[in-house]
Amino acid sequence: MKESDQLDAIDRRIVRELQRDAGLSHAALAERVGASAASVWRRVRQLEKDEVLGRAVRLASPQALGRAVNVLCQVRMTRQTVESRAEFEDFIQSREEIVECYAMSGEWDYLLRIAVRDVADYDRFIMRGVLAHPSVAHAASNFALRQVKYTTEIPV
């Protein structure tokens, strides 16, 4: 994998532009970054091979899909065994409401971002899902009042 400081100026521009709009044609991308379409095509393929660029996706609107309530949930495990963590992480992967999950250092073991319809939807999810899991000792939830900043762009 290429380190960010090993990318040249054109590669950096390509990465910035594709983070903003992954649907750009190679010709449009070439125009924006000041290179030929053939060169951009080769560079994009190399950036994908080097795992600088991942798969292209379209971001969906949580509001339009009825999942506008964001809850940040901190989870503390009952045990720290490899097996119990793997079992919990398999559970996390199986739940579509959990859109992000981070293994944490500090007081809590995991931080989840959960997208639900409303408070009742979250109550059902937390009681029948997370808190019912045998590896979970405690969970603490915080409801987002509004989103101040959200981006998928990584600084280049």
Image (cartoon, helix red, strand yellow):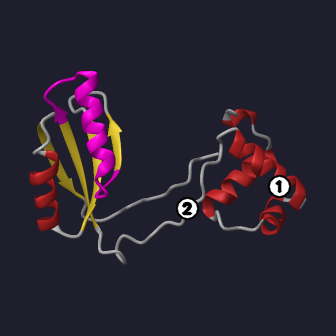
Q: Residue at x 25, y 34 (%)?
A: 87
Looking at the picture, how far across and down is residue 119, in whole percent? 14, 66
Relative depth, front residue between 148 and 53: 53
Dot placed on the residue nearer the N-terminal end, 2 or 1: 1
Looking at the picture, how far across and down is residue 130, in whole percent? 16, 46
Q: Is residue 77 left or right of residue 43?
A: left
Residue 57, numbered circle: 2
Relative depth, front residue between 51 and 147: 51
Q: Is residue 81 above or below residue 49?
A: above
Closer to the eye: label 2 or 1: 2
Q: Amino acid at mark 2?
A: Val
Q: Amino acid at mark 1?
A: Val
Q: Which residues are magenta?
A: 76-99
Q: Is residue 124 left or right of residue 115?
A: left
Q: Residue at x 70, y 38 (%)?
A: 50
Does the stretch in magenta take in 51? no
Q: Residue at x 42, y 59 (%)?
A: 149
Give the alpha-carbon distance from disc 2 to disc 1, as whole Å: 19 Å
